[in-house]
């Protein structure tokens, strides 16, 4: 495992722009952009698209996603968004009246709304878990909250506001011991934080591609545990049925689904114009190496955190947070209109909750760090004046 030199030349980022906002939306690489251009041009000649392409393209996406998250490709379904994957989980997981569905406070809405609806339909309760004041982390809080009355635990790998890390190995073991289902939103971690679903054993795990998978908007992948692969899909479409490869016999309607998790695929899962972009992004991530990406970005966020500390900002230590994620807080609150004022200086970050969210990637370098710190210093001085 080694650090990776800056890869800015692989992206079309202007030198005057400091983009530290991958958790909002990643840029795609030049290679992915070229793949997308070829794919869009392909729609001008539809006669060149073969029946085999309807299946080979999404299957390549499944294969790459499975490698990234440590899962079997047969368990991967193609979905349009994280919310779609959550809907599939909510449609299939059993919840009895009076049971609890555990979520984290300030968790991303797509991993809240399905559980609120499910709880209302089943007479269950959503338990929104908050951190106690004794310094416990999210892992400790979850382990303490999971009981025999827990039906589902729905959690990310790291919290989207500040990167606070959840130990999914421990949480997965606790869920199995209590016969609770585990549903993961990996959108803020897949492709950048090493993940092994074969060890964690969630029931469902989903990730959208437009963040750290370095892919397009409108596409994602859902992994389904083998015990749920005969479940009910969100929709019924022709491509998920057994024998769909034979276009001449599609009207010989089949009750049987294709094997694995393909029954959970969305309609038009081939996504001819954007799947090649996702494939190119994931291929590049695997070439770089997920562990090496994480090591490189950990060093970068440590560098930023140390300099921000001199300005009065606080952050979680690595280990408490994922290394690619840095949430900066400040006693007395953040300077007013910070995000816009930094953007006016061509420095792009987010504010989520009380934190300035800093999420770099391999296209960032020391110049970007200097620009961010200089701009932040200016805004702190303005706020203190």
Image: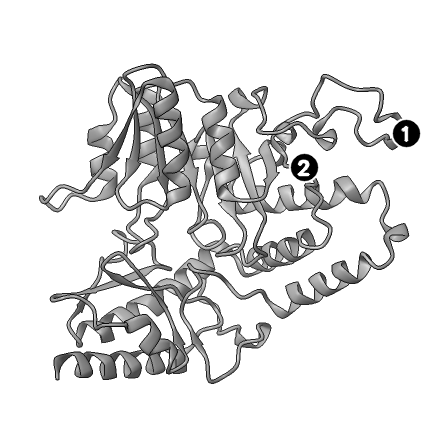
Find the distance from the CA under tag 2 to the CA under tag 1: 19 Å
Helix, strand or loop under label 2: loop
Q: Which mark is residue 163?
A: none
Q: Position of residue 364 (x, y in %)?
A: 44, 73
Q: Nearer the viewer, residue 23 or 301?
A: 23
Helix, strand or loop under label 1: helix
Q: Nearer the viewer, residue 376 or 1?
A: 376
Q: Position of residue 310 (x, y in %)?
A: 17, 76
Residue found 73% across the figure and 46% down from its top:
57
Confirm whether residue 1 shows in the render.
no
- In the picture of the structure, the residue carrying the numbered disc 2 is 267
Left or right placement of residue 72 versus residue 302 in this view: right
Mark 2 / mark 1, whichever is N-terminal: 1
- In the picture of the structure, the residue carrying the numbered disc 1 is 248
Q: Position of residue 270 (x, y in %)?
A: 71, 44
Q: Quadrant of residue 248?
A: top right
Q: Is residue 220 above or below residue 343?
A: above
Q: Is residue 227 above or below residue 157?
A: above
Residue furthest to the left in view is 134
Q: Quadrant of residue 265?
A: top right
Q: Is residue 354 above or below residue 343?
A: above
Q: Position of residue 204 (x, y in %)?
A: 47, 32
**Quadrant (top left, top right, bottom left, bottom right) of the C terminus:** bottom left
Left or right placement of residue 7 versus residue 333 in this view: right
Residue found 49% across the figure and 22% down from its top:
92
């Amino acid at each position: 495992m080694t650090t990776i030199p800056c890869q800015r030349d692989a992206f079309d980022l202007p030198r005057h722009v400091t983009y530290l906002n991958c958790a909002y939306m990643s840029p795609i690489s030049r290679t992915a952009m070229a793949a997308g251009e070829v794919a869009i041009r392909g729609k001008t000649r539809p006669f060149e698209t073969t029946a085999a392409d309807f299946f080979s393209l999404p299957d390549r996406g499944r294969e790459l996603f499975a490698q990234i998250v440590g899962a079997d490709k047969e368990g991967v379904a193609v979905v349009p968004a994280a919310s779609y994957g959550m809907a599939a989980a909510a449609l299939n997981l059993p919840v009895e009246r009076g049971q609890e569905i555990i979520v984290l406070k300030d968790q991303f809405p797509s991993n809240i709304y399905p559980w609120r609806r499910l709880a209302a339909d089943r007479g269950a309760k959503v338990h929104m878990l908050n951190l106690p004041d004794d310094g416990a982390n999210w892992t400790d809080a979850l382990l303490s909250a999971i009981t025999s009355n827990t039906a589902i635990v729905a959690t990310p790998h790291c919290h989207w506001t500040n990167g606070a890390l959840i130990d999914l190995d421990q949480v997965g073991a606790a869920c199995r011991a209590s016969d609770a289902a585990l549903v993961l939103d990996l959108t803020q971690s897949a492709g950048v934080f090493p993940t092994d679903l074969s060890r964690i054993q969630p029931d469902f795990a989903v990730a959208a591609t437009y963040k750290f998978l370095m892919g397009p908007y409108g596409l994602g992948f859902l992994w389904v545990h083998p015990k749920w692969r005969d479940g009910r899909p969100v929709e019924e479409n022709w491509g998920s049925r057994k024998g769909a490869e034979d276009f001449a016999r599609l009207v010989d309607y089949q009750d049987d689904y294709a094997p694995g998790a393909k029954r959970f695929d969305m309609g038009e899962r081939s996504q001819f114009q954007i799947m090649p972009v996702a494939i190119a992004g994931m291929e590049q991530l695997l070439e770089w190496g997920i562990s090496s990406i994480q090591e490189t970005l950990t060093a970068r966020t440590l560098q930023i955190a140390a300099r921000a500390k001199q300005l009065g900002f606080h952050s979680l230590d690595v280990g408490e947070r994922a290394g690619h994620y840095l949430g900066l807080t400040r006693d007395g609150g953040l300077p007013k209109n910070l995000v816009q004022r930094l953007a006016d200086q061509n420095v792009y970050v987010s504010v989520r909750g009380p934190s300035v969210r800093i999420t770099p990637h391999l296209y960032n370098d020391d110049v970007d760090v200097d620009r961010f710190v200089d701009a932040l210093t200016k805004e702190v001085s303005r706020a203190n004046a």
